[in-house]
Amino acid sequence: MHDSHSTPARLTATATTKLPRLPLLALGLVYILAGLFFRDPWKTDDVAGLATMLTALEDGWHAWLLPKIGNMAYAQNGPLITWVGAFCIWLFSPLFELFTTPLEATLLASRLPNLLWFGIITGSVWYGTYLLGRRPEPQPLALPFGGEPTVRDYGRMIADAALLLILATVGIIWRLHETSEVPALIAFQALAFYAVARMLDHPLSGAITLGIALGAAFLTRGWIGSLPIILAVPCLFIPRSALWPAKHWLIISAVLAIVLGLLWWIPAKNFSTYWIHNWWLWNLTSFGMPQYQAVLGVLRDLPWFLWPTWPFALLAIWRWRTWLFAPHIWIPLMFLLWPFIIMLFLADAFEPEYSLMAVPAAVLAAFALPTLRRGVVNSLDWFAVMCFSLACATVWLGWIALQAGWPEQISHNIARQTRGYEAFISWSAVAMALLGTLAWIAIVRWRLHTKPAALWRGTVLSACGIVLTWLLLVTLWLPALDYVRSYREVSSHLTQALHTHQRPGECVRGLSLGTGQRASFLVFNDLRFSYSAECTLVLQQTSPDAVQAGLADFAPNSVVLWEGKRGADRREMFRLLRLDSR
């Protein structure tokens, strides 16, 4: 084993001063609660997940087994988020209906699972990193006259830093507030990371947890969700790894994961070979040989999605390069590397796939912190202060321009994106935004005046900065965001048009209707669209340019009964047509 003098970590006991638990808990609650409730579902993943839950409740057990959006088979994911979300709606929406409308009660209940997923993510990241941080390999250099941190304090400091860094990760904050597969996918990957760390000292409980995490990842997003974990695990149990003695416990993990998958797969296959065929087709066609443009897209998007953790993750790999096979580097490295490799072979990799890199990047970044010099840490502190202060000022300035029309150029640019929106002020939202801003000023003042020695200070600034920016966006800007991204209004207008024009027993067929649009019309007004060619009413999704050029004409004798679109959308519109039934 390596000589302890080769460790790159240099730390004193004062740098591992305990971070108070109450502020950490408050920060986590603000993070997940802000923007989770009291907003409309937005297309596509957010509203599609909710639509599968509602369809399951309305259509019975077969829609629980095989996720659907109304009449459309939604064979892109597994059924797990549908199960959990539908159960929460069934259990809690009657309670919420005592205080609000049935639709709002459903929206509130559907987002309760996000609290569960967030709890699994934060708990797994903290405890998994703590288990790695208290091992002998990552301990800092022993000082000649003492004063180095205790093993417990050092592990807790690293775990706190990893938790704050996952909160500070820019790309996942929006996604963790969706009723989609993404929060669950991150949760089960974080659980798999914790399980592997647990197997270092408690192989049985770790193996059971790993099997559950792997099976749940498969039930959440099929092979795309589970393959990165499946490929990472064998690489973790190589002979040079500290996990090698626990390798035989993986049999329990494998059996448990397979059983969980088959408990759904067998009845699903027996009930609908069509749905399962589409599910297999979607999984298989998602993979292919790497394409130049797709790889460039991944390399372009990942740096902003994983900001600010990825530079520190790379730095950790470099600084601990002589300890590469030590568990605190090798375990998060494999969980980081395999999602990236899988992404290169995906035809359309985007944020759901990027999100699998967030947890291991945060853990690796945390182990880079003890290797940094004090001057570098101070510079990063000031960068966080300036960056997020500027971001918050920008959000406030944009809101003032939206409300007051000044500065004129900014107001003009915002008006182009929110055409038709009538600005109004919600004083309760403004009060919350002001409280958040004052809290940020207090944190900056604390950093200026107390000059804390604790190594977690920079991660606190980054996490608080991103949470404040998010809080301002979902308080000051939520009505405008709902206007731009929600289908509530156009769905209501379509429902009125159908009440006027639809004859008794007449079905409506969807033409070129996207998944997000189908899901939105189902969620807001319970509208379902048939695939039958016998339908004489057709809802067509097209664009104003296509209509103007005559490219949207569907049938020579069709009559346009209604046209509508979202107020700010210049590229999408809907037409309700009646076909000549002769």
Image (cartoon, rainbow, N blue to C red):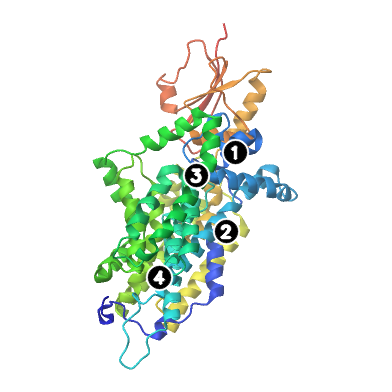
> Which residue is tagged 4?
132
The quadrant where residue 141 appears: bottom left
In the image, what residue occupies the spot 35% across and 51% down? 231
Asked if labels 4 and 2 touch by Cβ distance under 8 angstroms, the answer is no
Label 1: which residue?
64
> CA gap, disc 2 to disc 4?
30 Å
Tag 2: residue type? Answer: Leu
Mark 2, residue position: 33
* Cβ–Cβ under 8 Å for marks 4 and 3: no
Q: Which residue is mark 3?
A: 261
Query: Does residue 486 lie above or below 147 as drawn?
Result: above
Q: Choose mark 1 or mark 2, whichever is in front.
A: 1
Give the residue displayed 25% in from the left and 78% down from the top.
Answer: 6
Task: First in sequence, mark 1 or 2: give its number.
Answer: 2
Whole-angstrom CA distance, mark 1 to mark 2, is 28 Å
Q: Earlier in the sequence, mark 1 or mark 4?
A: 1
In the rendered image, the vertical position of residue 198 relative to residue 455, given as above or below: above
Question: Which residue is situated farthest in the bottom direction here?
Answer: 145
